[in-house]
Image (cartoon, grey):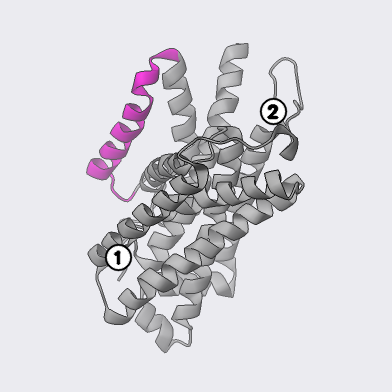
Amino acid sequence: MELFASQLLNGLSLGSLYALFGIGFGLVFATMGILNAAQGCYASWAAIIGLATAEHLKLPFPLVMLAGVAAGAIVAIGVDQIGFQPLRKRGTDMLGALITSIAFWMILDSLAGFATGQQSLSFPVTSYPSQMLLTAPVPLPAMQLITIVALVVVAAGMHWLLAHTSLGSAIRAVGWNPVAAALGGVNSRNIILLTAALAGAISGIAGSLGGILTSNVSYSLGQSLMLKGFAAVVVGGYTDVRGTAIAGIILGVLEVFVGQYISTALRDGFTYSLLLIFLLVRPQGLFGSRSFTRA
């Protein structure tokens, strides 16, 4: 029973990382209509910058997290303005945006590999809360609890923003039809820029927390979050923040349990099999609407 509870906690924290990343990824798709292959690099660079501030500036954990979040947002804005904004002006379709994002993915991945020396680095133990909050009956590492709480706060905050504020209405309007939104007085470019920054910041949270939890600060961190976060978006529903959060948790828990009780070799295969099933049987996901593409 203790092993089950411990693995459940591991699955919840891992799933929280997938869900956090998925929320940022889904926000970009729903608003801009872009399957952004470079999104994982935002998480990688957030972890790299966070590690640099922890090692060289000796900043406390909240400021380390803030540095990672800022890094994710800045990289996202840069990619959007350099890569995607010119495409929007020319009216390029989704395929052109996807190819552009793949190019940025390769560039940012290469730079991340150079910055880390092609190694998997770790945060200093003194740079984050490393204590156990509970030792019996099941150990509760502080960072796992922080990750789960971070997901709850971000998911609730994003749902409130999108569903109950004028800014959220503007974001949804741009996602549905940017031309109609502009005719209604919405500054589409500013909304898209803000959305890019917000999605990058959320990816930065996932990357910074993921770098600490997995002791893996490298370009591969973003790749893993990208693949599993995309699966969470598809399973949960492209346009539903709560669905993405729930799906991410489900994927994380199932992945840990499959690895523990069946075979570690089947962990990823199980996740992507579930992704394939949803794409074939229910492409709108658990909670998304049937019309999840932009008008």
Task: Judge left or right: residue 188 versus residue 94.
Answer: right
Task: Judge left or right: residue 64 versus residue 259.
Answer: right
Residue at image point 64% right, 37% down: 123
Magenta stretch, main secondary structure, is helix
Q: Are marks 1 and 2 in contact (CB under 8 Å)?
A: no
Residue 129 in the magenta stretch? The answer is no
Q: Secondary structure at mark 2?
A: loop
In the displayed structure, 180 sits above or below 284; it is: below
Q: Secondary structure at mark 1?
A: helix
Crowding near the residue tagged with mark 2, few <14, some 14–19, many ≥20 C-alpha atoms within 10 Å: some
Front one among 167 and 81: 81
Indicate the position of residue 190 as horizontal and vertical percent values: 50, 78
Q: Quadrant of the N terminus?
A: top right
Magenta range is 261-284
Q: Quadrant of the C terminus?
A: bottom left
Label placed on residue 141: 2
Indicate the position of residue 80 as horizontal and vertical percent values: 43, 69
Residue 265 in the magenta stretch? The answer is yes
Indicate the position of residue 133 as horizontal and vertical percent values: 77, 27
Residue at image point 59% right, 45% down: 208
Residue at image point 27% right, 78% down: 91
In the picture of the structure, the residue carrying the numbered disc 1 is: 97
In the displayed structure, 87 sits above or below 34; it is: below
Which quarter of the figure has residue 138?
A: top right
Crowding near the residue tagged with mark 1, few <14, some 14–19, many ≥20 C-alpha atoms within 10 Å: many
Q: Amino acid at mark 1?
A: Ala
Q: Amino acid at mark 2?
A: Pro
Indicate the position of residue 194 as horizontal and vertical percent values: 53, 71
Q: What distance separates the C-alpha of mark 1 from that of mark 2? A: 41 Å
| Whether residue 215 can be seen here | yes
